[in-house]
Amino acid sequence: MELQPLDFEKPIFELQRRLQDLKDHSDEHDVDLASAVEAIEAKIRETRREIYGNLTAWQRVQIARHVQRPFALDYVERCFTNWIELRGDRHFADDKAMPSGLAMLGSQRCVVLTHQKGRNTKENVMRNFGCAHPEGYRKALRLMRLAEKFGMPVISLIDTPGAFPGIGSEERHISEAIAVNLREMMSLGVPIIAAVIGEGGSGGALGIGVADRVLIFENAYYSVISPEACSAILWRDRRHAPEAAEALKLTAQDLLKLEVVDEIVPEPEGGAHRDYDLSSANLGTALRQNLQRVGGTSIEELLKKRYKKFRALGNFAEGKSTTPSTRS
């Protein structure tokens, strides 16, 4: 699969193109260009370190949205075994934006909830660009109750710009469906592990994101609003999305400092789309370790910790200013 560079990656791809041209010229004309090849290879390594070691929040958002990035079902295929998709919410329909079902994580049977995007127009129409309708969240709740009944942990793979805001979605009470999930997940009597694998947008992400352990990929993001929407509200112009991304503190690194997430899952240099197998191995390891970490806790203690975890979000203590007051 030929990689599609993002704008800020073009200097790397240009150097790689020049390197390939040199190698082709050397082979074709039997010329020794080893020193020139080594110089460009060194320049490529230096440029990669410079770019990927200093990514901005907006650049990480672009990586999280990369069309070649692994999606949920790619991880299901590589991290789990015996996947059985279960369809329908038993009220209205099946939501193809949220394929969910039963699978084995190692030796542990679990319920897996996902958001799924598409790689082309046909797939995106079918998956509704990863934006779920109310029936998606009601299907997820049905499966979570199934997990509770049979004592299976729940694992959710989050990758959505947000819940679908269309008329039909509103008519079928999307806000109510998400709110019910928030309430029910808070008291669900089995371990829950959530992993943000790409985009974690607003209530659409949080609708399957109330968990004992919240993981996030190194270049994924988790935010109450997209940078573009935030920019449109604050600046009346979507062109300020990069500034909005910085202000929202939506990167994995910022979220870990704020204790919104519990662990960052490493990615290959340049993003998860560069090595599906390595990214999947990292995610699988993190899921198994965190499931083992919470698996030995009693349900009563688990629920107390879960409640305490989410009640603590958004609480900040501001220190008093040491600057003398100028008011008389």
Image: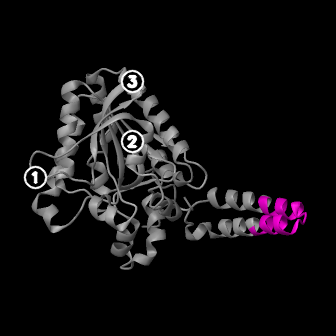
User: Magenta region: which residues?
Assistant: 21-41
Q: Of the numbered discs in the image, which one, if any, rests on residue 11? A: none
Residue 325, how many percent across, how many down? 46, 62
Q: Residue at x 20, y 45 (%)?
A: 87
Residue named by callout 2: 76
Q: Which amino acid does the dot numbered 1 rest on? A: Phe
Q: Which mark is first along the chain, 3 or 1?
A: 1
Q: Is residue 289 above or below residue 28?
A: above
Which quadrant does the N terminus fall into?
bottom right
Residue named by callout 3: 107
The image shows a total of numbered marks equal to: 3
Residue 149 among magenta residues: no
> Image check: 252 left or right of 137?
right
Residue 48 position by quadrant: bottom right
Q: Residue at x 52, y 47 (%)?
A: 276
Indicate the secondary structure of the residue bearing disc 1. loop
Q: Is residue 283 above or below residue 23?
A: above
Q: Of the numbered discs in the image, which one, if any, rests on residue 92? A: 1
Question: Within 10 angstroms of label 1, few (less than 14), some, or many (20 or more) residues?
Answer: few
> Image check: 290 left or right of 122?
right
